[in-house]
Amino acid sequence: MDSKEWYEFNHASDKEFVFTLKNGKIQVEKYKYNPNVILDIPIGKLIGINRGEFGGGLYFKPKDSTQQFFVNGKNINEIRPRFFGGLMMLDKDPLTKMLKDSKLIQSGNANFVFKFNDSICFMGGVAHMGTNYGSLFKLKSIHNSFSISKGIKLGDSPSAMNIHKGVLYIAGHKGFYTIDKNWQVKTVFDDLFWDGLYPTSVVVLDRKNVFVTIRGGYVKINLENKKMTLYKAK
């Protein structure tokens, strides 16, 4: 951290990209920031919004807007944004149009909304000005009711993730973590040099070949011997 090399990576904003896996081969694509993620469910859409220090939330856009919905027993129309973590957004923001007719389920950044371990999950957090935290929540949808479990604390804001063979791999703002099928969180690395280098994607080939893209390059992780190799983008 804060070395000459770190600053060189930190200022390489023109070299931000993501890895994806297609037909067993890693593909490289230019990174593009997207403040929202969408998961289709039978009764509508779950929309996760992540605006960093400007807040966010998990929203629900129902197929049937006339039906009443409940979250942990509370009418969804009565849920209000939290003062801290609530979404701050101008009327002219494109997200305003996208969220039309949507209902807030829970305040706070929802970086990811996905299915894992036979559950719907959403995960988010904040890393800003010395603040750094993250959580994963499980959500159940039965008819017109949602139930949200108590959050699983990550201790770090999640930046990128992937699921491979029933294990969730998470690149946080400053660490790397796994969550297994028993919902056990394991800290693989903490206080990493990539604090401030903004991980953008995780690709897993196997436990010896895990790749995390960061600003200015990428990191290859071997989970068997807990070693990392840093590669610098040309």
Image (tube, grey):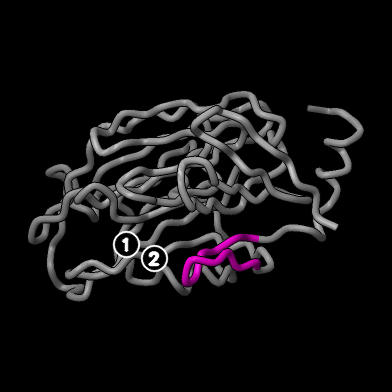
Count the numbered circles shown: 2
Helix, strand or loop at disc 2? strand
Can the viewer see residue 50 in this picture?
yes
Where residue 69 sits, quadrant-wise, is bottom left
Horizontally, residue 149 falls left or right of residue 111, namely left
What is the C-alpha distance between the residues marked 1 and 2? 6 Å
Looking at the picture, which amino acid does disc 1 mark?
Leu
In this figure, which residue is indicated by the disc labeled 2? 38
Name the residue rendered at 22%, 42% in the picture: 148
Image coordinates of residue 112 in percent, x first then y, are: 43, 52
Where residue 102 sits, quadrant-wise, is bottom left
Q: Quadrant of the C terminus?
A: bottom right
Image coordinates of residue 96 in percent, x first then y, are: 49, 68
Helix, strand or loop at disc 1? strand
Name the residue rendered at 35%, 43% in the picture: 167
- Count neighbours of disc 1 (C-alpha within 10 A) and say few if under 14, some if 14 to 19, many if 20 or more: many
In this picture, which residue range is highlighted in magenta?
18-28
In this figure, which residue is indicated by the disc labeled 1? 46
79, 163: nearer the viewer: 163
233, 195: nearer the viewer: 233
Circles 1 and 2: CB atoms closer than 8 Å: yes
N-terminal-most mark, 1 or 2: 2
Residue found at the very far right of the displayed protein = 4
Name the residue rendered at 44%, 30% in the picture: 154
Looking at the picture, which amino acid does disc 2 mark?
Ile
Can the viewer see residue 108 in this picture?
no
